[in-house]
Image (tube, rainbow, N blue to C red):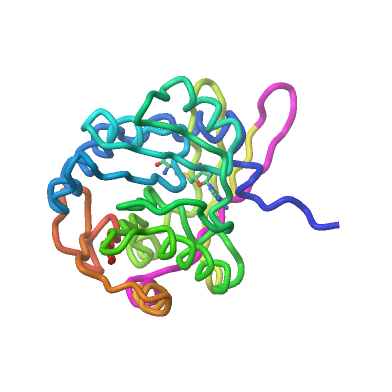
Amino acid sequence: MKTKDWFTDWFNTSYYHILYKERNDSEAQLFMKNITDLLRLDTATHILDLPCGKGRHAVFLNSLGYTVTGKDLSENSIEAAKPFENETLNFKVHDMRQPLSKTYDAIFNLFTSFGYFEADIEDLLILENIKKGLKKDGFFVFDFLNARLVKENLVSNEIKIVEGIHFNITREITQDFIVKNISFFANGKQHAYTERVKYLDEEKMSYYLNKVGFKIVHTFGDYHLNPFQPAHSNRLILVAK
Ligand SMILES: C[S@@+](CC[C@H](N)C(=O)[O-])C[C@H]1O[C@@H](n2cnc3c(N)ncnc32)[C@H](O)[C@@H]1O
């Protein structure tokens, strides 16, 4: 019997949201403002936020005047996002390995929401779905960690205490993956999860994007849209058409 994929389980738990509750939403909003200004997206633009989590970027983009659809595999996250829906903002459960049923003016893949799968062919399948889900001249915005920086500054052991839970975190780089093991005791039992993100650097991502027919039009290294510097940038942000 095939066990469930780690990303189906972990991202659907309340513990995932507790561990990452301090993520910087003002920085995420600054990024959305900067990128939509740079791409000169007008308010007739329909943006797909894939995957959207609980909708933090989607809700903000909608407040800027865009029509936004947010899709995510996690049923619990979509349920948490649903109350924010309005005429120009909607959320749906969707697995990004499945084709999209509509086309969009722009598709955003934000905050390291890629590289979860074992085989390169699955990564390529997702990018193909995204390419086919874009209207002519539509933009794909890809926001990922800078794998080299993560590798060179790897914190192999860490304890984070959030809402009284002691999260014991270990990190390692295996041949192709950045692996984070998270264990903790909560609600009367011990839990253990693993986050596994493929070691995708600029070269490999460019190869992927070219292979499915994208052309990279911008490369940035942070949410202020400074140029990407492989040894220093926090993020790898690619814009492709
Ligand atoms: C790191 S979170 C980022 C979510 C959101 N972009 C944000 O910034 O809050 C990654 C998200 O990917 C979703 N995910 C993982 N595998 C997926 C898949 N196959 N299809 C759709 N969503 C997926 C998870 O449920 C999770 O919400």
Left or right: where 50 falls relative to 98:
left
Q: Position of residue 127 (x, y in %)?
A: 45, 65
Place of residue 158 in the rendered image (x, y in percent of width and height, measured from the top left): 48, 44
> Does residue 54 lie above or below 116 as drawn?
above
Q: Which residue is rendered at x = 21% and y = 48% of the image?
A: 223
Asked whether, in this view, residue 77 is left or right of residue 44, the answer is right
Q: Is residue 208 above or below residue 43?
A: below
Residue drawn 50% across the image and 49% down it: 157
Q: Which residues are magenta?
A: 185-205
In-front residue for pair 89/135: 135
- Residue 41 position within the rendered picture, expressed as x and y whole percent measured from the top left: 18, 48
- The answer to whether residue 187 is left or right of residue 218 is right
Tally of marks:
0
Q: Quadrant of the C terminus?
A: bottom left
Q: Is residue 44 magenta?
A: no
Q: Is 202 in the magenta?
A: yes
